[in-house]
């Protein structure tokens, strides 16, 4: 007979628990009383045992996800047993809003359009089907009772993230109460609209990271910046550029240092995915695509057109597309989705002969790279003084999401790549 | 009723390697589940300098590389439990209560609050007014953390426990806090009272309030008896 594994209430005050670790995989044989997973509440971990024997037929909630108590986590049953009834039942009650990553796949959340706040949409507590969560809209207006509307406003709960259980999916009082206890993301937690959002993985915050975020914000304002500067030898990049442009002579194409920088930064971010992130209140978004914003000065300010999926593009394509974007940015002809949602940003003031500078992060981004002019200067190389072309870059990081050592390692990779740029064109 | 409930008090002298203490706990938990051990046990000990990484922790949460830490004589140990980076070292009273919550109360949050209560009461005898910070398990003196708590429960038998800074070298905590910006300010009995109380004496007080809070009669025990 099939038995359920649920997130049990390990304390009367326990509202939700986190899956720490599954000790069995789907299909593994399980004996009654055997430990199948560990869950965490507060600072206590609990081993959870199977209540029946058979095989672990289904794992419904992945590791690291946080779900309300009572949520069905898995099913133990005979190998050939039909458990669709249990799964259907679980789906029917899956109204709770998971604050964890309830996506059973390796946590990739598809781009979701411009939704302010944190989660793209409330994840269903059990990831059976991508349940149609957004409540019914009436010509853009969300159906909710006046009381629910007022309560949501008072508590800073975004109505569009609440699942309505009233008539015709109308949001009523108890839905707001439920959302308040299960932690629906509040308004403005990210600060700014994320715009057309690149795909990302949700990374839960450790206690340490929460403490870092909380304290550093008190020290340095809502986005606690820190800055890392490195000097990079650009000799080989300049040689590479000259050679590339010679070979491209007939095509009318040109490769500039900027494009090489874009490509290098994308490559370096692939090696350091923890730098391709944004801090989102109760978690960190680790983007699974590299979208680089290019700061462009315009008449009355600046704008950062975003070149999408840079890592997947070659230098030629980067050159063509970035030049086109920059040109339209100068003419103020960019659509909003073309200047929102960068996962990394480059601001280059080299053409103004600036040696080095620090750039201010544009929330919700977590990083921006400030690039100075490439200048000839004397450098000590192996004990002799040589004239070298050097460029200073300064990386600004949001300390809530990124630590000094991570940033430094990223810069080291960027430097290594720029000083040995041939592999970029391979 | 009170007289029936015994807690064996196991005090290990000197410094006990983290791995050794882990093995001992496992052995005792097994004995408890198997019925060979019928009493609750409180182990009090000190660890050599060690940083433990829970499953949720990332090496990037360390301020120094594993090699640098090894050079400083700090061991880095990954442990199969959740949570963050924890530091243990000389001058820190580590308590591993192995209690059967089935005999007390099957309530994990209650258990965490009770452990906090044990330490709050013990600290009170040294004139330290300690308390709780809602949402942040542990024992705090204002905004300074004096004791950390993290427990593991198997069939309602507990292991792991608490770490109370008595004369701990607080600078060591910087090893796990990036940039030296104090994410969490740590403190110790010594820092709060201005006196280096002996860890044995603090252990006495903790054992006494443990007995009181959990309504147990403490009986000193020897390690050999369990082995």
Image (cartoon, coloured by chain):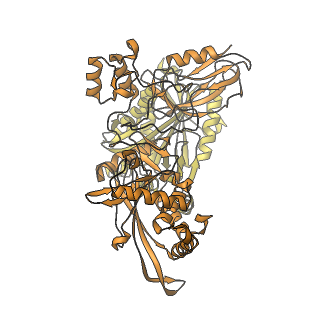
A288 or A59: which is nearer to us?
A: A288
The quadrant the C terminus of chain B occupies is top right
Residue A62 against residue A190 in the figure, above or below: above
Residue A194 against residue B175 in the figure, above or below: above
Residue at the (42%, 67%) spot, across then down: A393
Residue A4 against residue A292 in the figure, above or below: above
Q: Position of residue A320 (x, y in %)?
A: 49, 59
Which chain is assigned orange?
A: A
- Figure quadrant of residue B179: bottom left
Residue at the (74%, 18%) spot, across then down: A80
Residue, far bottom: A384
Q: Which hue is chain B drawn in?
A: yellow
B120 or A145: which is nearer to us?
A: A145
Q: Position of residue A231 (x, y in %)?
A: 45, 72
How many marks are shown on the rendered structure? 0
Q: Position of residue B216 (x, y in %)?
A: 48, 26
Q: Is residue B203 visible?
A: yes
Left or right position of B34 against B189:
right
Residue at the (56%, 29%) spot, across then down: A61
Residue at the (51%, 77%) spot, across then down: A235
Left or right position of A2 against B212:
right
């Amino acid at each position: 007979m099939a038995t359920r594994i649920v997130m049990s209430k390990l304390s009367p005050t326990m509202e939700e628990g986190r899956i720490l670790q599954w000790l069995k995989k789907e299909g593994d044989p399980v004996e009654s009383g055997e430990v199948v997973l560990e869950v965490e509440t507060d600072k206590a971990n609990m081993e959870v045992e199977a209540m029946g024997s058979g095989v672990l037929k289904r794992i419904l909630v992945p590791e690291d996800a946080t779900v309300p108590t009572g949520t069905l986590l898995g099913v133990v049953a005979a190998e050939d047993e039909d458990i669709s009834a249990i799964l259907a039942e679980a789906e029917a009650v899956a109204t709770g809003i998971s604050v964890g990553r309830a996506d059973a796949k390796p946590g990739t959340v598809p781009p979701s359009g411009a939704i302010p706040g944190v989660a793209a949409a409330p994840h269903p507590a059990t990831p059976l089907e991508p349940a149609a969560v957004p409540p019914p809209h009436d010509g853009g207006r969300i159906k909710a009772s006046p009381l629910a509307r007022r309560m949501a406003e008072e508590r800073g709960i975004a109505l569009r993230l609440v699942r309505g259980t009233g008539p015709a999916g109308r949001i009523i009082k108890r839905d707001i109460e439920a959302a308040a206890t299960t932690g629906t993301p509040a308004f403005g937690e990210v600060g700014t609209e994320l715009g057309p959002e690149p795909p990302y993985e949700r990374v839960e915050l450790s206690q340490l990271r929460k403490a870092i975020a909380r304290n550093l914000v008190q020290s340095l304002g809502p986005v606690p910046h820190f800055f890392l500067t490195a000097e990079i030898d650009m000799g080989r990049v300049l040689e590479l550029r000259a050679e590339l442009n010679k070979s491209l002579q007939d095509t009318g194409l040109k490769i500039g240092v900027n494009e090489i920088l874009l490509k290098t930064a994308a490559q370096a971010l692939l090696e350091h995915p923890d730098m391709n992130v944004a801090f989102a209140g109760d978690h960190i978004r680790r983007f699974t695509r590299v979208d680089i914003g290019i700061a462009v000065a315009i008449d009355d300010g600046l704008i950062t057109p975003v070149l999408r999926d840079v890592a997947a593009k070659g230098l030629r394509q980067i050159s063509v597309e970035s030049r086109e974007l920059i040109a339209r940015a100068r003419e103020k002809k960019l659509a909003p989705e073309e200047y929102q949602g960068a996962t990394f940003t480059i601001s280059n003031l080299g053409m103004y002969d600036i040696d080095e500078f620090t750039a201010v992060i544009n929330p919700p981004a977590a990083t921006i790279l400030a690039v100075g002019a490439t200048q000839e200067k004397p450098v000590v190389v192996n004990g002799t003084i040589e004239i070298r072309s050097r460029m200073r870059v300064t990386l600004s990081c949001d300390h809530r999401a990124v630590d000094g050592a991570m940033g430094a390692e990223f810069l080291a990779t960027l430097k290594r790549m720029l000083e040995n740029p041939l592999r970029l064109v391979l | 009723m009170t007289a029936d409930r015994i807690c064996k008090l196991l005090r290990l002298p000197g410094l006990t390697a983290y791995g050794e203490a882990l093995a001992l706990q496992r052995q005792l938990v097994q004995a408890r589940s198997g019925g060979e051990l019928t009493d609750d046990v409180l182990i009090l000990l000190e660890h050599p300098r060690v940083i433990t990484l829970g499953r949720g922790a990332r090496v990037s949460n360390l301020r120094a590389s594993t090699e640098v830490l090894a050079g400083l004589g700090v061991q880095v140990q990954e442990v199969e439990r959740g949570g963050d980076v924890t530091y243990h070292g000389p001058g820190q009273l580590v308590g591993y209560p192995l209690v059967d919550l089935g005999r007390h109360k099957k309530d994990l949050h209650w258990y965490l609050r009770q452990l906090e209560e044990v330490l709050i009461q013990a600290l009170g005898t040294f004139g330290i007014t300690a308390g709780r910070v809602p949402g942040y398990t542990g024992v705090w003196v204002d905004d300074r953390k004096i004791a950390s708590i993290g427990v593991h429960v198997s069939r309602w038998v507990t292991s792991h426990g608490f770490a109370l800074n008595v004369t701990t070298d607080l600078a060591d905590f910087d090893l796990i806090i990036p940039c030296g910006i104090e994410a969490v300010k740590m403190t110790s009995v010594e820092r709060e009272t201005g006196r280096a109380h002996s860890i044995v004496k603090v252990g006495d007080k903790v054992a006494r309030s443990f007995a009181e809070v959990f309504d147990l009669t403490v009986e000193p025990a020897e390690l050999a008896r369990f082995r």
